[in-house]
Every structure is written in structure tokens, then in C-alpha cells.
Image (spheres, rainbow, N blue to C red):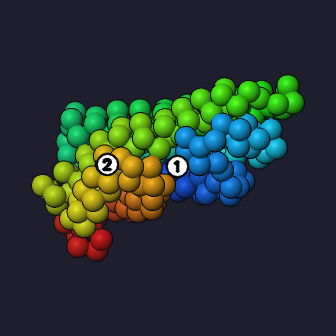
């Protein structure tokens, strides 16, 4: 009897995350500049509070599915690198912390919309603080944490045959981009493509293990 591979559905949470993230961005529409004019940010909260609350809710749900992807990533790395792998732990901690920061950033951004909806307006300075803190959490802090989760599979892929080597090089580039401000503000968005690639790869790898396909044969196919 073949040993069962890790559950295949958690990694698919990454694909759902990307779909919801794109939807949330579309719903949010045009947003003010980071550290922009407080009056313009206050006007944005007042006029677009409906879109802000809707997109924020979608982002929160996206974060839920991203956490499932993180769990699947950790399981897949343990499978490839051995039980108790510190690299799997790094992926779990980095991905969990990064996702928590993203969820927190979305929630803080929603506060401005809620206040504007309830009171009919919002103080420009308060609006600027909420908007800037939300942006920093999502675009600067979260990428730093996620870099650990991205670089962990890079090391596994480059030092063993359990994962394809192309994943290692792509992950190194992605991880470095996530560590460099202000590039990481945009890298956290592009990271969605990395999440999709890894989700599909781990899903296929789990299926091959359950079918009894040798790792080497799977690597060659990948």
C-alpha cells in the first residue's frame, strides 16, 4: 500500500486567494496615493465607503483561503524535506505572519469606510493615518514576512530532487523582490502568480505520490 501524500485541497486555497484578491482590487477601484493629501483620502472614504467595505470583506475572505494554502505549503515542504524540517516551519511562520498582516491591513482600511458611513464624514488626519497604516501593513510589512515563506521552498528545490529546480530560481527572485522596499509593495501583488504555480505544483506532486509515482519521475515530468 502506498503511503498517502498530503491532502490536495489546502494548496488550492492559494488559487482561490488569487481570484478573490483580483476581485477585491477591481471592486476597490481607483485608490488615493500612499501618504497622499489627507483631504483626498478623507473624500475617498466618504464617497467610496461602499466599495471600500465590499473590497475589504473580499480581501478578508481571500486571507482565509491564503492561510489554507500556507498549511498546504508547509505540509508539502515537510514531505519533500523531511518531518520537522526548519524550512517547512519557516514557510508556516512567514506565510502565517504575512497573511495576518495582510488581513490586518484590510481590516484597518475598512475602519475608515465604516466611520465615514456611520458619521457621514471622517477627519482628514484620521483618514490619512488609517489609510497609511493599512498600506504599510499590506505593502511593506507583509512582504517581509512572506519572503521567508517564498525562500523556504527555494532552498528545498535547489538542494534536493523533491521539487523542480526552476521553482528554486523563481522563488529566489520572488523572495528577494519581497525584501526590497519599495519594490515589495508591488511584489506582494505579483506574488499571486507564484502562489498559483506552487499550488498547482504541490497539487500535482501530492497526486503523483498517492498514485505511487516516484519523485524522480515526477520531477522529470515537471
Q: Residue at coordinates 44% horizontally, 49% vertically from top-left?
A: 185
Considering the numbered disc 1 on the image, is that residue within a helix, a strand or a loop? helix
Q: Which residue is at 20% across, 46% downward?
A: 81
Give residue 56's quadrant in the image: top right
Above-or-below relation of 71 to 199:
above
For the residue pair 201 and 40, the one nearer the viewer reads as 40
Residue at 85% across, 25% down: 119
Residue 132 is situated, as x and y percent measured from the top left of the image, at 56, 36
Identify the image quadrant of residue 146.
Answer: top left
Question: Could you say which disc has been placed on residue 13 in the image?
Answer: 1
Q: Residue at x 59, y 48 (%)?
A: 33
- Going by the image, does 202 lie left or right of 160? right
- Is 20 left or right of 98, judged from the image as shown? right
Query: Residue 25: in sight, yes or no?
Result: yes
What's the distance in space between the residues labelled 1 and 2, CA to CA?
Answer: 27 Å
Q: Residue furthest left?
A: 159
Which residue matches tag 2?
180
Examine the rendering and report whether any part of residue 63 can be seen. Answer: no
Q: Are marks 1 and 2 in contact (CB under 8 Å)?
A: no
Q: Residue furthest bottom?
A: 221
Amino acid at each position: 500500500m502506498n503511503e498517502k501524500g498530503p491532502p490536495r485541497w489546502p494548496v488550492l486555497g492559494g488559487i482561490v486567494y488569487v481570484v478573490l484578491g483580483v476581485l477585491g482590487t477591481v471592486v476597490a477601484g481607483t485608490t488615493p496615493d500612499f501618504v497622499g493629501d489627507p483631504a483626498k483620502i478623507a473624500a475617498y472614504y466618504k464617497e467610496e465607503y461602499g466599495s471600500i467595505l465590499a473590497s475589504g470583506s473580499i480581501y478578508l475572505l481571500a486571507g482565509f483561503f491564503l492561510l489554507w494554502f500556507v498549511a498546504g505549503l508547509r505540509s508539502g515542504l515537510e514531505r519533500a524535506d523531511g518531518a520537522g524540517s526548519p524550512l517547512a516551519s519557516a514557510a508556516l511562520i512567514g506565510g502565517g505572519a504575512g497573511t495576518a498582516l495582510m488581513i490586518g491591513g484590510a481590516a484597518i482600511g475598512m475602519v475608515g469606510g465604516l466611520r465615514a458611513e456611520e458619521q457621514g464624514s471622517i477627519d482628514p488626519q484620521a483618514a490619512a493615518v488609517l489609510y497609511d497604516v493599512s498600506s504599510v501593513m499590506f505593502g511593506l510589512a507583509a512582504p517581509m514576512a512572506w519572503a521567508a515563506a517564498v525562500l523556504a521552498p527555494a532552498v528545498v528545490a535547489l538542494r534536493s530532487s523533491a521539487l523542480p529546480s526552476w521553482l528554486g530560481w523563481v522563488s529566489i527572485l520572488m523572495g528577494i523582490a519581497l525584501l526590497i522596499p519599495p519594490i515589495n509593495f508591488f511584489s506582494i501583488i505579483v506574488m499571486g502568480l507564484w502562489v498559483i504555480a506552487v499550488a498547482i505544483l504541490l497539487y500535482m506532486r501530492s497526486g503523483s505520490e498517492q498514485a505511487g509515482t516516484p519523485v524522480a519521475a515526477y520531477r522529470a515530468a515537471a
